[in-house]
Amino acid sequence: MPARELRRWRPDFWTMVLLFTLLLIAVLLFLPVGKVFLLSFSDAQTGEFTFANYARIFSHQYYVKALNNTLIVGVAGMLGACVLGIPLAYCMSRYHIPGKSLVSTLAVLALVSPPFIGAYAWIMIFGANGVITNWFKLAGIQTPTIYGYTGIILVFSLKFYPFVYLMTESAFSSINKSLEEAAENLGCTPFQRFRKVTLPLVFPAVSTGAILSFVLSIADFGTPSIIGRKVRTLSTVAYSQYTSELGGPPTLAVTVSMLMIAISIAALLLQRYIISKKRYASSLTNLSTPVRLRGWKAGLVYTLCFSIVLVSVFPSLVVIYTSFLETSGPVFTGGFGLSSYNRVINEISRAVINSFLLASVAVVLIGLISGMISYIIVRREGKIGGVLDTILMVPYLVPGIVMAIGFVTTFNRWPVDLVATATIIILVVFIRRLPYGVRSTTASLRQIKPSIEEAAASLGARPLNVFMQVTTPLIMPGLIAGAMMSFITAINELSSTLILYTGKTVTMPVYIYISVLDGEFGIAAALSTLLLVSTGVCVYIVFRISHGSKSAFL
Amino acid sequence: MADVFIDRVKKSYGSVVALHDITLDIPSGSFFTLLGPSGCGKTTLLRTIAGFHKQDQGSISVAGEVLDSIPVHRRDIGMVFQDYAIFPHLSVRANIAFGLRQRKVTRADIRTRVAEILRVVQLEHLADRMPHELSGGQQQRVGLARALVTRPKVLLMDEPLSNLDAQLRIDLRRELRSLQQDLGITTIYVTHDQEEALEMSDHVCVMYQGVIQQAANPWTIYHQPANRFVASFVGTNNFLPVELKDDVPCLCDALIGHIDGLPADLGRTQQVASIRPEHIELQTGTTLWSEAQPSGQRSDYVHFPATVHYQSFAGRELRLTAGVADGLEVQLITEPHHEYLDLAAQSPITLRVRNDRICFYEVGETGVRL
Ligand SMILES: Nc1ncnc2c1ncn2[C@@H]1O[C@H](COP(=O)(O)OP(=O)(O)OP(=O)(O)O)[C@@H](O)[C@H]1O
Ligand SMILES: [Mg+2]
């Protein structure tokens, strides 16, 4: 640009917002992730460029095993989610099921409750000292262990199947009935028909849900750490590596982190590639209407649907139940009582307050900024909207542990030293959950005709006034739904906070994690119940705002 | 009040050229209509004037002030939208007050001006309704009131009536026009309804493929179209190929009589002739006019023997399609006399047209008039 034009160039309001957004993303996303990337190629002592970290990881049994484990539980968790999610979606979309909305609400609740609660609830039931284990012990029967692969995969399957279910259900209901009928006419058995016609048609939706389950499975820290015992995954290894490298640059921890990011990206690209190969045009005509079942078939289908969702919310019910059991220290004394809650109030009210405070601040920030980012994504001419939309996928791909390590290794000295502050926890939660807010408001904004905003501008409203007086009131439902979703994930955040917290900034999930490791199940249950209740309240608000649409939760 | 001057404006979307060197001078206080088929660039031009997007080249000025670097909200140009674009979260009153609030007009002034404009558009009884409680026509009135209450220099309207039903459109045409005349506000109006354009406008600008075909008053547009496109787009027209027979131009083999007052260079380029349906007169039978005409003497008319192909009675007029020569058909409109109504298909008839009613164009979609 020639100097003369440069002087004339005065950015308008939205250009400034765009620049600010790009700056924000650069500092809070690219800088920490880039730092992790660079650190993984540098020597811990000299800081010189080296491949030694990767060489070391790929030559040590400890890391290779963790990598294998991660892939095993990731793939198995994903398959488990499909095995539960696809039949549930099929039954829910094709058959008339009494209490349908109860089933989907329970599935949503299973989806939004934190996975580590599931992990330790299953331990309370099937663990070494679990309720059911002890029953069988009385009968002299040795039950198979819940620790290790079994437990992790069980928790992941029950936690992530709602993704597959919610995505696939709408795909099943929008299949053109004629296609299936044609297949039947051509002599396909029902099973062949399902495999050859129906399944390929819902494949894009299934694969999206499955990949989401896979990415979240490999990123999860709480579950393998609580129920995995000797089965270590990359996230637990990264965490223990990080804590053992404290003091020096955590080169091995970040190298493990890079591995996790690489796996996530590879999975996403794979899914994109598969979908691009199989693209079917679907027409929304001749939709199938749910069939009313009779006799044993009905019993079978109802039992299937309800047992899937009930088993998946069972851990939460167990947790709530145990939170009302009387304890003395870590020991349940039998009978009901509020001693766990008393201890929470007297000993660890700080964690409760922190959780709500930190999550609220992060969510307010998300609310303030996601509307503006959506505006740029939806309204701005040119490619920048699409680019921004894609960039906001990145936080989904960076596990919490990795993001946290990125932040502490980036913002640890002058001019920005955030180590051990509440700010760093808020910022990590903010950037990780920003995509939820943006996605929700973007969907809302796309429903609003641009002419309404143009009308405001032509009536003399400045861009900021157009946004505040016209756009914002109109996207408010999306904004609130997005904020609630961000709040749910923010208040349940464990993995990143575990790396960033100090005694002053401890949160409920961290305290639950510590209590579980210490065997303080009473306190863990009371705190988990608080989390579940606030999560439930948010879910209720989202349901009210989105008029029962479940897409807000994806 | 303000005149609008559009100076060599160009605008393209990628490879699609939407506006091609548009130059227009719109007089202050006039009702100026952009007319053209879908996709010809009307909306693009209007939105460029409003400032919703910037032209690639050229400049736009209002009342002598160049607008090019002025953002939408400071242009002081009102706009009425095709989809009404009423703020759904604000009441009728608040919708109308919106522009005044942006201008920091005092509360008392806002109240009186809103009340005044509500009276003008006859919406007083609906002032406190929400937009979703209004009909389409009422919403469009709100849109109009909202744009007018700020007393903008120029009012832009993009097909404001196209989503309304037929009768309401006709009523609102009158209303809009008389309101515009009362206020004397320069108005640029977009439509693809030619009747609307001719009825309401001081000036009509016919556009096609991003190019101005003709800008003139409605009478000129209709009776002296600048080119073949205008002739075919505005009103109905019969186009007949012109052939040379012994250096004498003929409309078709069957034509009887001479065509008077032909342009000098007629015959050198390929041409078509146009005749408006209402300019064709009809006589039953084959003889009357042609026999009445003394041979060798020049006549003001040309005649066609023809046969009836199809006729439809539309109440106040009769529309008739007639075959004049092999494959050629003409449409004509005449009074619905009984004797015409009784004509069976293939009955022989005679048509005649006054010489000076026939226009000639170079061939090609936008061939110029000769
Ligand atoms: N945002 C856009 N991106 C790309 N091309 C566009 C865009 N808007 C308009 N066009 C193209 O520019 C040309 C002119 O469009 P415009 O909307 O001005 O037509 P119009 O005369 O208003 O038509 P209509 O009567 O259908 O409203 C068309 O070919 C159209 O396809
Ligand atoms: Mg248009």
Image (cartoon, grey):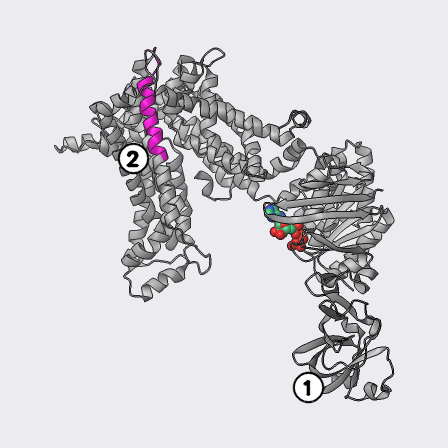
Whether label 2 touches label 1, CB < 8 Å: no
Residue pictured at 36% horizontal, 42% vertical: A271
Q: Is residue A170 left or right of residue B74?
A: left
According to the picture, the residue beneath numbered tag 1 turns out to be B346
According to the picture, the residue beneath numbered tag 2 turns out to be A74
Q: Main secondary structure of the magenta part?
A: helix
Q: Is residue A498 left or right of residue B360?
A: left
Residue pictured at 52% horizontal, 25% vertical: A24
> Considering the image in quadrants, where does the C terminus of chain A appear?
top left
Residue neighbourhood size for the residue with mark 2, other residues' Cα within 10 Å, grouped as few (<14), some (14–19), many (≥20): many
Q: Which residues are magenta?
A: A248-265
Chain letter for mark 2, please.
A
Residue A449: horizontal and vertical position, in percent?
A: 61, 45
Which of the 4 image quadrants contains residue B209?
bottom right
User: In the rendered structure, does residue A113 fall within the stretch colored magenta?
Assistant: no
The label shown at residue A47 is none
Which of the 4 image quadrants contains residue A158?
top left
Which residue of the protein is positioned furthest toward the left in this rendering?
A140
- Whether discs 2 and 1 lie on one chain: the answer is no
- How far separated are the C-alphas under marks 2 and 1? 82 Å
Label 1 near ligand 1 (CB < 8 Å): no
Residue B211: horizontal and vertical position, in percent?
A: 70, 52
Residue neighbourhood size for the residue with mark 1, other residues' Cα within 10 Å, grouped as few (<14), some (14–19), many (≥20): few
**Which amino acid, by three-letter code, is at mark 1?**
Gln
Task: Please tell me which residue lies in front, A209 or A410.
Answer: A410
Chain letter for mark 1, please.
B
Judged by depth in the image, the label closer to the viewer, 2 or 1, is: 1
Q: Is residue B89 visible?
A: no
Label 1 secondary element: loop
Residue B92: horizontal and vertical position, in percent?
A: 72, 44
Residue A83: horizontal and vertical position, in percent?
A: 29, 45
> Considering the image in quadrants, where does the N terminus of chain A appear?
top right
